[in-house]
Amino acid sequence: MFRELEVGSAGVLATTIGLIVLTIGLILYFRMRYRKFDYQELESINSKVKSSSLSAKTKFPEVDVFKNAGSFFNFGMAAALAISLVAMSWTTYEKEVYIPDDALAMEDEVEIEIPRTAEPPPPPPPPPPPVIQEVPDTEVLEEEAPKFLNQEVTEETKIETPAFVPKAPPPPPPPPPKAVEEEIFKVVEQMPRFPGCEDKGTDKEKDDCAKKKMLEFIYANLKYPAIARENGVEGGVVLQFVVDKDGGITETKIVRDIGAGCGEAAELVVKSMNSMGKKWTPGKQRGRPVKVLYTLPVKFKLEG
């Protein structure tokens, strides 16, 4: 059973340099070899030798470079084969990411302040109870019979036109109601997950895989601030962010910071998750995606 050939970058570079040096060496060797011939002496010798038209293909057979064409062709084929084999076996290795022990463990409990959502307006006060007024006893007076006016219209009757009174404009419509912000959950039935693990089997396998990939992404892109490295600043930074219903990262906030630019460096890595090309799998409550508040500790530790 053949073992798969693996060649690193150093091996590819060494092979390429070796082939170039070998080719240049062969060129220099043949140039020196053919320069040592004295062409005047060769011409005097060849003039004395009577050769047939078939044998006298070149003027100086001793320096005929075409007789080595087969060797040059074989060398070129061998060099091309070696380059192809090395190129197909070129293996690159991912840089090992250093992840601190218990990277997701927090030393102290962090008071999680859930972003406030818009509260509904209070109900209107109840109407006051009706006041029952006692009606005094009054005498019922008999109404007099109405008197009918003479409404006969003649030529001498003057009709007065009532004055025109413009109507008041209608009142403006009430302002539209304010949009109620969606609730942000702290714990849901299905917590949000880092992308790249939805092909796993159970939910536990997906969660474990998502946490591992998230830590690899964070510590592969986290840059230790120079001022913190020079002053030996170590410790844990705690961030909070909201995983939106579409998997985007919003409302990033530094909850705990150790200074020297560490909090800003961790926040920059979290915000860069929106540029990964794949978004988080959003959290779900009762089968529908919802906004979820996520708390993430990031540890800064100097190696060595």
Image (cartoon, rainbow, N blue to C red):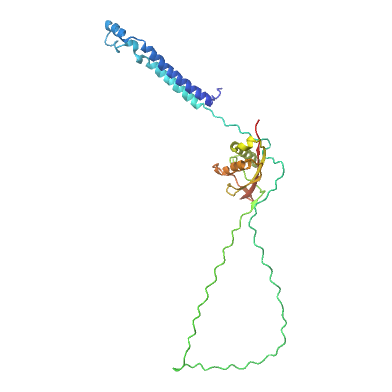
Of residues 268 and 23, which is closer to you in this image?
268
Vertical relation: 270 (above or below) 177: above
Quarter of the picture containing the N terminus is top right
Of residues 1 and 150, which is closer to you in this image?
150
Spot the residue most to the top: 48
Asked if residue 11 shows in the view, the reply is yes
Residue sitting at x 34%, y 12% = 63
**Image quadrant of residue 135?**
bottom right
Vertical relation: 149 (above or below) 132: below
Q: Residue 242 location in percent, x, y?
A: 62, 48
Residue sitting at x 67%, y 40% = 236
Numbered-mark total: 0
Q: Residue 128 location in percent, x, y?
A: 70, 72
Q: Residue 220 location in percent, x, y?
A: 59, 36
In the picture, measured across the screen, residue 49 lies left or right of residue 35, that is left
Vertical relation: 199 (above or below) 17: below
